[in-house]
């Protein structure tokens, strides 16, 4: 598989079932973290099992509402949703599922609708794709505080320490 980049996955560790308001704050903080760590502009995808109304439910509505809130609170951020993961990161899929999106196909900051999807997804990518995964990293606190999975590697510890130093600057 071709390497497609560096991503921030949120929230994978703390907020079990965030409200639309909380999800919008997670997205804004995650965009800031992506820019701080990577030095590039975030393209934030508000993830769902639906893209642009391909399904409807309270779960989809939460993501739509959160996306609207992010756009109101941080109009300079590049954000779109609701998007399925493939539409968010694969340009060919984005063309058919979300034509005209400024994020679809090039998302680098992935906002999961709840802890189940975020945690399962990051561990799946880490283990099956053999990707480097650092964190969970905590955001929105007065001072940097981060966590590690009990299944982490020694290199994960070094990576989280380095990222915590960046957060402290």
Image (spheres, rainbow, N blue to C red):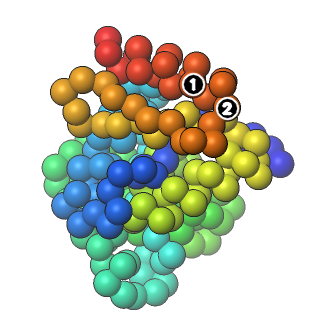
**Residue 157 coordinates in the image, percent (x, y):** 57, 25
Pick the quarter of the image with the C terminus. Answer: top left
Please state if 165 lies on the left or on the right of 151 as rendered. left
* Quarter of the figure with residue 33: top left
The furthest residue to the top: 169
Q: Which mark is residue 54?
A: none
- 25 or 139, which is in the foreground? 139
Q: Is residue 21 visible?
A: yes
Please state if 91 lies on the left or on the right of 138 as rendered. right
- 149 or 135, which is in the foreground? 149
Badge 2 marks a residue whose secondary structure is loop
Please state if 34 lies on the left or on the right of 72 as rendered. right
The furthest residue to the right: 1
Who's the residue at 35% across and 51% down the image? 14
Residue 72, compared with residue 126, is above or below; it is below
The furthest residue to the front: 150
- 158 or 51, which is in the foreground? 158
* Quarter of the figure with residue 97: bottom right
Please state if 133 lies on the left or on the right of 15 as rendered. right
Badge 1 marks a residue whose secondary structure is helix
Q: Which residue is mark 2?
A: 153
The number of numbered discs placed on residues in the rendered structure image is 2
* Quarter of the figure with residue 74: top left
Q: Which residue is mark 1?
A: 157
Who's the residue at 46% across and 40% down the image? 136
The reply to whether discs 2 and 1 touch (Cβ–Cβ < 8 Å) is: yes
Who's the residue at 35% across and 62% down the image? 16
**Residue 34 coordinates in the image, percent (x, y):** 43, 33
Who's the residue at 58% across and 58% down the image? 121
């Amino acid at each position: 598989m071709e390497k497609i980049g560096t991503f921030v996955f949120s929230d994978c560790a703390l907020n079990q079932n965030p409200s639309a308001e909380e999800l919008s704050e997670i997205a804004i903080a995650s965009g800031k973290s992506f820019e701080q760590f990577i030095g590039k502009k975030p393209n934030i995808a508000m993830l769902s099992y639906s893209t642009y109304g391909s399904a409807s439910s309270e779960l989809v509505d939460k993501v739509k509402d959160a996306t609207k809130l992010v756009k109101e609170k941080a109009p300079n951020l590049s954000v779109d949703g609701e998007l399925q993961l493939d539409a968010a990161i694969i340009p060919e899929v984005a063309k058919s599922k979300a034509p005209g999106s400024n994020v679809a196909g090039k998302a680098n900051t992935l906002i999961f609708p709840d802890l189940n999807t975020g945690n399962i997804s990051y561990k799946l990518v880490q283990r099956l794709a053999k990707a480097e995964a650092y964190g969970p990293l905590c955001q929105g606190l007065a001072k940097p505080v981060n966590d590690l999975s009990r299944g982490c590697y020694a290199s994960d510890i070094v990576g989280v320490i380095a990222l915590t130093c960046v957060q402290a600057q």
